[in-house]
Image (spheres, helix red, strand yellow):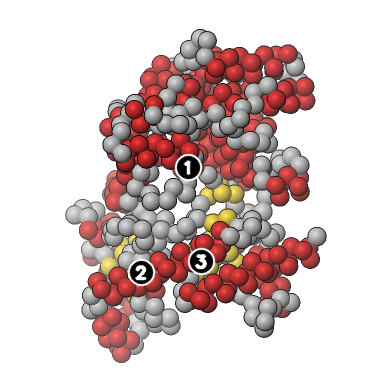
Amino acid sequence: MKTRQELKQNPELLKDKCRGAIIGIAIGDSFGDASRKPDNQLSYGITTDFHKGASWSTDDTEFALLTARTILECRGKLTDEDVVNAWLENVATQDEFKRGGASEFEASRNLRRGLRPPLSGQYNSYCHSDGAAMRIAPVGVYCAGDIDAAIAMAETDAHISHYGEGIWGAQAVAAAVACAMADGTIDEILAAAMKPIPEGTWFRAAMEKAFAIVDRAEGNFLNAWMPLHDELWCSYKATVSEAVAEAFGVLKLVNGDFRTGVVAAGNFGRDADTIGAIVGSILGAKYGASTIPAHWVEKPRYPTGTCLTIEQMKMLLDVAVEHDLYLVADEVYREFTYDGEPLHSFGKFDYGQENLILIDSVSKRFSACGARIGCLISRNKDFMANALKYCQARLSVATLDQIAAAALYTVGPDYFEQVRQEYKRRRDTIYAKLQAIPGVVCKEPKGAFYVMAKLPVDNTDEFQKWLLTEFEDNGETVMYAPGEGFYATPGHGKDEVRLAYVLKQADLERAMDLLALGIKKYNALKK
C-alpha cells in the first residue's frame, strides 16, 4: 500500500483514482440496474457491455454524489450536523420519494419527525439494508490510504439512516475504497473491509462464508457462482449480509480488472445495482479512470430539467473567476421551475461579473414562437463592445421587433406564476403517462418544459419514420424529436427522445396514448 503522503506526491495518479472511484459507482450502478432487467436477460442472458445509447443511474449514484458533496462542503470535517443539514435540504424535503430505497425513506420520515442521528438510523425498520454501503465510497476516496479515518467518517455518514449491520456494511466499503486508493492488493482490500466488522455478527459470518465459497471453488468462477447466490440469500435482497457480502465475494472471485469485475457484479441479479456500484467503486479506485473502457464513461446519465442550487451556481462562478474563464449562462428557463424550486440567477452574485455572460430569449420565455430576438447581458466592457460590433454590422433585428420584445419584459410576476402552474400540470401529465408505458425510462423534470425519455426501441429515428409513414390510430399519429441530435458523442441517444410539453393537457394525453400504442405495435412487428 501507498501512504497518503505518497499519493499526494503524485497528483495525476491521485486524480485518476478519484475519478475512477466516482465514475465506477455510476457505471457499476447503471450496469447492474440494466443487466437485471427482463428485456436484457431475454435478449442476452448475460450482459457484457452497455448498448443502445445511455444507461440510467439509480439512487446509488445520486446518494453517493450527495455524500461527496457534503464532504467537500465541510472540507472533510464531517459531523452529524453536516449530514443532517444535507439530508434536510436534499432528501427529506421531497413530498414523494421517487429516488431511494426503504432505509432512506424511513430515515427521511424520522428527520421530519425530529429524530436525529443515531436515533434516526436506529429506529429504522430497514437499518440493516445496504443503503449506506451504496453511497459511502466518496468517504474512502477522501480518506485514501487512511483506513481508520475512513471507518470513523463512514459511521458519521451512515448512522443517519442505519444501525448495526447497516453501519458496518458502510464502514467495510469505505475501508476497502481507502485501501484501493492506496494501491492495496485484493487481499489487502478484503482485509481492510473486514476490520470494522465485529466478531460474532451475522455480517461477519456472511463475509467469511463468501470468502470460503471462493476458496472452496479454488477461484473457479463457475463453481463459486451459484453457491454465492444460494448460501448468502436473504429474504430481503438489499440486506447488508446478502448484498455487501456478495459484492466482496465477487471481488475476491474476479480479482481482476475493472470491466471483468463490473460485468460479474452487474450480472449477479437481486440488488445488482448496489453490488455493481460497490465493486465498481473499489476497482475504479484501485485501477483508476484511465483503465475504464472509454465508451463506458459517458453511458450513465440522467438528463433533463435539472435545477442548480445557489451553492452549485456559486461553485461554477468560483471556478470561472479562479481560472479567468467566461461563464455563459443561458437563463431562458429561469422562471420555469416546479415543486418549490427557488428562482436563481447568476446576475445576483456581487462578484465575478467580469467573467459572466447572461443569455435570454423572447420566444421561449414568453411562448412567442418565431420571435427571433433575445438579449445578451454582461458587465465585461470589452466583450460587450465586440458583441455590439457584430450586432451593428449584420445581426440586429428590426426596430419594431425590438420594441415589441421590450414590451413583453414589462409583465409582472403574476404572469409567470400562471404560466408556471400550467406547465407544471402539463409536466405532471406527460410524466405520469410516460411512467405508465412499459420499458420507458425518464426523470421528472424540475424545470423548463422538456423531458428526455428512453424508449424500448432500438432506434428512435427509425421508429419516428415508421410512426409517420405506417402508423395511425383514428387518423392520428405522433411526432417527437429523436434524442441522438442532442448529444455530441456519435451513437448516444439512439433510443431516446425529447418531448416538449407545450401542448394543452388533452392533446398531451392523446399524444402519449399514441406513443404507447405505437411502441407496442412497432415492437410486435420486430419480433
Question: Which of the marked residues, 1 or 2, is nearer the chain's N terminus?
Answer: 1
Residue 255 coordinates in the image, percent (x, y): 65, 22
Residue linked to disc 2: 421
SS for callout 3: helix
Q: Is residue 300 left or right of residue 52?
A: left
Q: Residue furthest top?
A: 199
Q: Residue furthest bottom?
A: 400
SS for callout 1: loop
182 lies above or below 513: above
Residue at the location (49% across, 40% down)?
Answer: 101
Residue 331 coordinates in the image, percent (x, y): 34, 64
Quarter of the C terminus within the rendering = bottom right
Residue 430 numbered mark, or none: 3
Q: Residue 225 lies in what quarter of the image?
A: top right
User: Looking at this view, is 471 or 322 the one in front?
Assistant: 471
Q: Is residue 472 left or right of residue 25?
A: right
Residue at the location (38% across, 40% down)?
Answer: 108
